[in-house]
Image (cartoon, coloured by chain):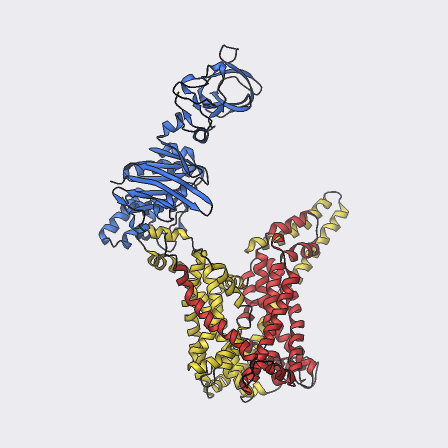
Amino acid sequence: MKSSSSEAVMPSSLSSRASASSSRSSSSSSPAAQTAHKPRRNDMTWKWLFRAGVSILVLWVLVPIALLMLNSVSTPEQITGWPKTLTPALSFETLDFFWHYQGVISALGNSLLAAAFTMVIAIVLGAPAGYALARFVFPGMNAYRMIIILSRAFPMPLLALPLAVIFIQVGIDDSILGLAMVHATLALPFAVLITSSLFMGIPVELEEAAWLMGCNRWQAFRRVVLPLAAPGITASAVFAFVISWNEVFASAILTVENRTLTAFLVQSLSESPAEIKYAGGLILVVPALLFLFAIRKYLFSMWGISNR
Amino acid sequence: MKHDRWLPYYLIAPSLLFMGAFFLYPFIQIFAEAFTSSDGDVGLANFTRIYQDFNFWPSLKNTLLLTGVVVPVQLVLAIGMALMVTRMNKGRNSILYIWTIPLGISDLAAGIIWLAILEQFGFLNSFLSAVSVIDAPASWLNYQNAFALFLAVVVAEIWRGTAIVLVILVSGMGLIPKEYDEAGQVFGANYWQRLWKITLPMLRPSIQSALILRTLLALEVFAVVMMLGGSDMPVLMSETFDWQFLYQQTGAAAAYAVLIMLISVVITGCYIKFLNVPKEAR
Amino acid sequence: MSAIQISAVRKQFGKQEILKSIDLEIRDKEFTVLLGPSGCGKSTLLRIIAGLEYESSGSIRIGEREITSLAPRDRRIAMVFQNYAVFPHMTVAENIAFGLRVRKDSEAHIQRKVKETAALMHIEDRLDHYSGQLSGGQRQRVAVARALAMEPEVLLMDEPLSNLDALLRLEMRAELKTILAASDTTTIYVTHDQVEAMSLADRIAVMKGGQIEQYAPPSEIYHYPATEFVGSFIGNPPMNFIPPDARWNHPTRPEQSSQQVHKCGIRPEDFEVRFEPTENFAPVRVLVSELLGSHKQLTARFGDEMIRVNVPSDLDVGNGSDIHIRPLAEKVRFYDHSGHLMSA
């Protein structure tokens, strides 16, 4: 999936046209001079079209986000004002207002806490399972794998509905831990599949060598596998964190007093002033973007693995 | 190395138990709730109730219409983007990261982003007025202009959701050996022929995966619609939310949930049936 | 004392019998090579000895200790893997020291052993490098140094040279031979390369289909192959197998045997060649004559078989030449219907 495939598609199609033109040019002089130019111009137009297309799509993704950021560094008047300009006042008034708005700080804290719990639960439960799938062959492993994959296919957030009732009965309703467990259910399949793929990429010979040099299974795992898997495990932990941070439906259903940021924004939709929305949006977006940027090396293979 | 034959089971047990408790059990509970009326009788009382609600048909229609418009557009767009990606060398990873940014953005944030653009005093209107296309701010999100509102949601959803299709397709493309395309070239096929007859058919399993996933997510659309349309554009998920949170009628909410799941299963079944590539042909 | 005794070791996987009751007695300090084509079970046997796979039945003893039920870490065995398995996140020095640290040896001892084995394998100047910075050959040296540093009772090597290019393989083979001879450790070495086996081994166990066909010193394997398979596997080109020929006064039934001779085995270099028809010489037409540098290799049809005859490189024989051949009587080996060597 590396540049080898891209090299193959582009240069070869170009070269096929190039060789066609050179074979024509070798036959006669003046028609050749004309035909030799035509393919080149065509190539150039395609190239520029291609570049234009890519640029448009890049802007299409980035501009809306930039606009949100614009709003969050504008003054409240600018936010509700008309028309909007591309030159905001660069004031922190909006963010300041947001920061001091009632319930925001605790909502932020709750989101962070929930995401952190989710991360821990997903990894602690998922990594051992990933290791089991990677290293062992045992009856039921295919069924287990199927369950994990199929769980992606169901509208997970809906599970918050009955859990709301159950949580009340158990006494963890409106708690961050309860929410984290729902989020972890969302993140767990990813964690299992990603860590499984991670461990499969570490040759078992390394563990075997460690076993022969005096390690038992756990020691070999700790000394040899874990250091090599650490970046990948961290990446999937961050992944789980972001999943929880971004989640809306379950958060809105399950938290009332201890609202997360997403729940806060949803539940205060009609009442809160516009600045809250935009500053809140910014706070939602920026950490996620930063985290995902930090693990971007793993991002692609993780999405690929977990969605296949 | 000899290992306790129960070791793998010890390792998967925690996750299995967890999934059992937090996935399987609520899953069964939803069905139980949906088919139990508030008096405790088993029956379709909840379903009748939501059916008779004035928001039922609108929400169903909106959700299906939205899905029906957004998913095909995203598929075509994502295929185009995936093809572009395979032709890139240098900037490939950066472009790929940028194009997949929407994946990391909460759908709530995406709703907020497009709200900033599309609201009455938003950026789109500012831009249009700056280039003198309109005089006064137009209401894209007004409930009186249902079509514009729908369009707005479509645009926001396309922005938000193409990335996931893209990712699956790019992964799938990476699995197609380049020799197939090269063979096509040797046999004289031009670009479009190769695309249509070689690349896309080989991409079918990925397309199937992507369609299933994206469609399911589209049926669950919630936060984007809430931000842009509020109660003006009900969808299945927002109705579920309202019944649960606002009206405190868990039975009805569960009925909606079952409905969503049912539609998901049916559509997934259709995808599998019509897009299935027999194992031998892979 | 680390003599190894392998008794009736069998391995079954599903319906397949990967190892069929292996019995092997390896002497203390001996260098044994397990040789055979892929799929013969040699690597499986090695891994069973290491404890990485388990046998279906049978037992293994090292010296006085029964190790069959022991975990790999308790067997006092070191192993060099085919792909080296050098830990990528540790330096060369840390790799070599790994087993000693796990054992909690004294720091002084560890330092000494690391320097010693690194010097032995000529990688003392790479001690602080990571495996990613090393070439394949260097990584292999690290793997060997790591194993030797453990001072094991038994050293196992699983095709350690097969991933090296031809020239490097030649160099490393010579180096390994010297180092391992000096280290005096009982060694079991797995390979499919018969040249490697012949060069390194004290004794070779030739394996096929999960069984040991012959376990003997290289010269005996070469000159007295116990089965047709061994004869055809060792030696390049392989031993010729032809039906007994009356012209050569081949007995149809050797003296001590009650069986009929099925095939005669004659090595390509064990023929006398004349150009004129001679009594007791069989005429053949040379189909292909290849000058291979040190000798000429002739391919000819003999009855239903194709045989190969090696002659001096200056002999004037080309494609299509007619020659007359006779094998050296003392070099002919007789095989019965089951492919086993008959005593002549």
Residue at the far right in the pictured view: A31
Query: Total label count?
Result: 0
Q: Where is residue B55 drawn, in percent x and y?
A: 64, 84
Left or right: C6 as drawn, with respect to B114: left
Give coordinates of residue B103: x percent, y percent: 55, 70
Relative side of B247 to C119, left or right: right
The N terminus of chain A lies in which quarter of the figure? bottom right
Give whichever of B57, C126 is nearer the camera: B57
Q: Is residue A242 visible?
A: no
Question: Which lettered chain is shown in yellow?
Answer: A
Q: Visible in this render: residue C210?
A: yes
Closest to the observer: A17 or A266? Answer: A266
> In the rendered image, which quarter is residue B18 located in?
bottom left
Toward the front, the furthest residue is: B41
Which chain is rendered red in the image? Answer: B
> Residue C155 sits in which quadrant?
top left
What is the x, y in percent for residue C140? 38, 45
Q: Position of residue B165 (x, y in %)?
A: 59, 66
The quadrant the C terminus of chain A occupies is bottom right
Colour blue belongs to chain: C
